[in-house]
Image: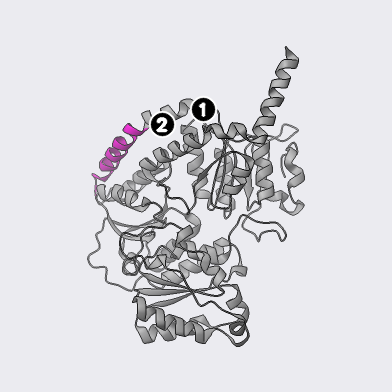
Amino acid sequence: MTDHATPTKSVIFEERADQIHVTGNDAAGAPNVFDLACNRPSLAGAVSQRACTFCGSRVVLYPIADALHLVHGPIGCAAYTWDIRGAMSSGPELHRLSFSTDLQERDVIFGGETKLYKALIELIDRHEPKAAFVYSTCIVGIIGDDIQAVCKKVSEEKGIPVLPVQSEGFKGNKRAGYEAACKAMAQLAGTADVSDVSPLSINILGDFNLAGEIWVIRDYYERMGLQVVATITGDGRVDAIRRCHGAALNLVQCNGATQPFAKIMEEKYGQPYIRVSYFGIEDMAQALYDVAEFFKDKDPAIMDRARKIVAEEVGGLLPRLREFRKDLEGKKAAIYVGGAFKAFSLIKAFRHLGMQVALVGSQTGTKEDYEELAAICDPGTIIVDDSNPLELSAFIKEKDVDIFVGGVKERPIAYKLGIGFCDHNHERKECLEGFVGMYNFALEVHRTVMSPVWRFMPRRVAKAAATAHCTEATI
């Protein structure tokens, strides 16, 4: 670890020391040199917060609502369903059903290809999906089932795309699952007519329509005069993905999840892409401006329409945020998210509320992501890659934060330590994107941070008693 003055050094595994960085100066007063290790296998024996390859593939593909999603593996993997990934649909909801071949010992010994074939035939006949995705999990990779051959055979028999997703969990980390999903999805693109697609058209990538967020974002772009060809993959449709190659521009929000798909589309169809974020005031506005800038030669008035949307939305939002700031000024936050892109926006959002981010980390950040984080963080901020509960707990206590922003695996850490929590992962039910999302985020932060219940937590009680004792001694 680069900051030798950090007292939590004792909880850090020696092999993980180079995956943690503290911004600012070291004990001798020299600037800490940023050299964070990342994107490597989790340390054996450490209970990583990171998810597996299969998880990554499900995150990307699961919101495609009119496709069949079949997990070829033990039943346990199929527990990862819509219920913990709240991607909403404006139409079909086939994605809400979780199917599995439920491999048993007999299948492991003799192979599961016949079982997979029968399951696909039965499910396609029953649900008539537009396409089917078959997810390969760890045990399938070990026993060597040829799911590509089975998928090809069923596709020819049933006349719909049946796509294998090579997402055996042991292959790598969550990022490897993103790439497996994007490769599978890319087989759909370019297979439908695009003659009616406007020159002013976009695809929205890397948004999963939690709490209807993609409908908020889609409305902004349509108010700017743009045609949204496909939403990939929130509120996704197979037919829309098949013609997404006709759009003029891809907008990539979740960089890790869908940038591989955007790169495939750029290489194969010459379709450009830009990175955006829909969280927070600055990043949401910047996303609209960047898109307007791209299309300004085709539509000179588009920038004015973008500015009008931002002015209307922000004008009513800022006075309400100032009310929250009166109570939250000086409070501290910790952030641990899946992709680093959220962290950038969250740091800016907390600054609007007068709060300081003391800890920030992610499961799948790249070296470039972390360098950007280090550049915008305050001195003394801990930046951590692929962390574990032991480290996170120690950092949170050391920094004495007031709220932890994370996902389902971070929630119990926060509550056990007696601090507020904000769910910013795929399990949440609150819209946090767009300008309305910034208000919802501020409201949730205010409610949890200012809750009186935290004063009764043992750690807070002990701290208050120690402070009172020191005050009496001084008097």
Q: Nearer the viewer, residue 297 or 226?
A: 226
User: In the image, is residue 131 above or below residue 21?
Assistant: below
Residue position marked by numbered label 1 in the rendering: 329
Determine if residue 33 is in view.
Answer: no
Q: How many marks do you count on the picture?
A: 2
Numbered mark located on residue 163 in the image: none
The answer to whether the residues at label 1 and label 2 have Cβ atoms under 8 Å apart is no
- Secondary structure under the numbered disc 1 in the rendered image: loop
Determine if residue 6 is in view.
Answer: yes
User: In the image, is residue 457 above or below residue 413?
Assistant: above
Q: CA distance from mark 1 to mark 2?
A: 12 Å
| Mark 1 closeness class: few <14, some 14–19, many ≥20 residues within 10 Å | some
Residue 33, given in percent of the width and then of the height, sits at 67, 42
Residue position marked by numbered label 2 in the rendering: 321
Magenta-drawn stretch contains 424:
no
Q: Which residues are magenta?
A: 299-317
Q: In the rendered view, does 443 fall on the left or right side of 53?
A: left
Query: Where the C terminus falls, by quadrant?
Result: top right
Residue at image position (58%, 46%) is 371
Residue 137, given in percent of the width and then of the height, sits at 56, 72
Q: Callout 1, which amino acid?
A: Glu
